[in-house]
Image (cartoon, helix red, strand yellow):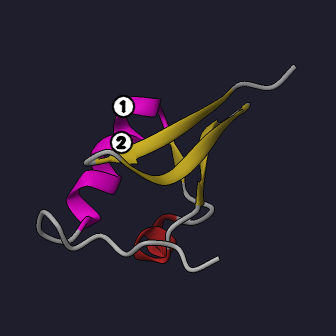
Amino acid sequence: MSEAFVIEVRGQAAGAVFRERSGYRFVAVDPTFAPLEGKTFASVVQAENSATRLAPPRGRLLRPSF
C-alpha cells in the first residue's frame, strides 16, 4: 500500500506527495506549483517547505479552473 500526503499552502491544495523508495515524489494540482512536478523530496516537510517558498504573496494563489 502506498503512502500519499496532500501538500497545502495557505489553506489551498498545492499538490500531493507519494512515497517511493527514493523519497516523496511531488505531483502538482495547482499550476503555480508545476515547477515542483516530479521532484523527489527526502520528507513531506521538505516538500511543504519547497511549495511554501514557491508560492506567490498571500492572497495570490491561483484557483484551479475546472
C-alpha separation, residue under disc 2 versus residue under disc 1:
5 Å
Relative height, residue 45 to residue 10 (above, below): above
Disc 1 crowd, CA 10 A, few/some/many (<14, 14-19, 20+): few
Q: Which mark is residue 45?
A: 1
- Can you name the residue that lies furthest to the top here? 1
Residue at image location 71% in from the left, 25% down from the top: 3
Q: Identify which amino acid the numbered label 2 is placed on.
A: Glu
Looking at the rendered image, the quarter that the N terminus falls into is top right
- Front residue of this view, candidates 32 and 44: 32
Q: Do the numbered discs 2 and 1 sit on residues whose CB atoms are within 8 Å?
A: yes
Looking at the rendered image, the quarter that the C terminus falls into is bottom right
Disc 2 crowd, CA 10 A, few/some/many (<14, 14-19, 20+): many
Q: Which mark is residue 48?
A: 2
Residue at image location 17% in from the left, 66% down from the top: 59
**Which structural element holds mark 1?**
helix
Q: Identify which amino acid the numbered label 1 is placed on.
A: Val
Residue 49 is one of the magenta-drawn residues:
yes
Query: Which portion, as a residue range, is magenta?
Result: 42-55
- Front residue of this view, candidates 28 and 21: 28
Residue 63 is one of the magenta-drawn residues:
no
Residue at image location 73% in from the left, 31% down from the top: 21
Main SS of residues in magenta: helix
Relative height, residue 8 to residue 60 (above, below): above
- Asked if residue 32 lies left or right of residue 22, the reply is left
- Asked if residue 61 lies left or right of residue 66, the reply is left
- Front residue of this view, candidates 49 and 39: 49
Residue at image location 59% in from the left, 42% down from the top: 17
Image coords of residue 23 (percent x, y):
60, 35
Image coords of residue 33 (percent x, y):
43, 68
Image coords of residue 5 (percent x, y):
58, 32
Relative height, residue 64 to residue 50 (above, below): below
Q: Quadrant of residue 2?
A: top right
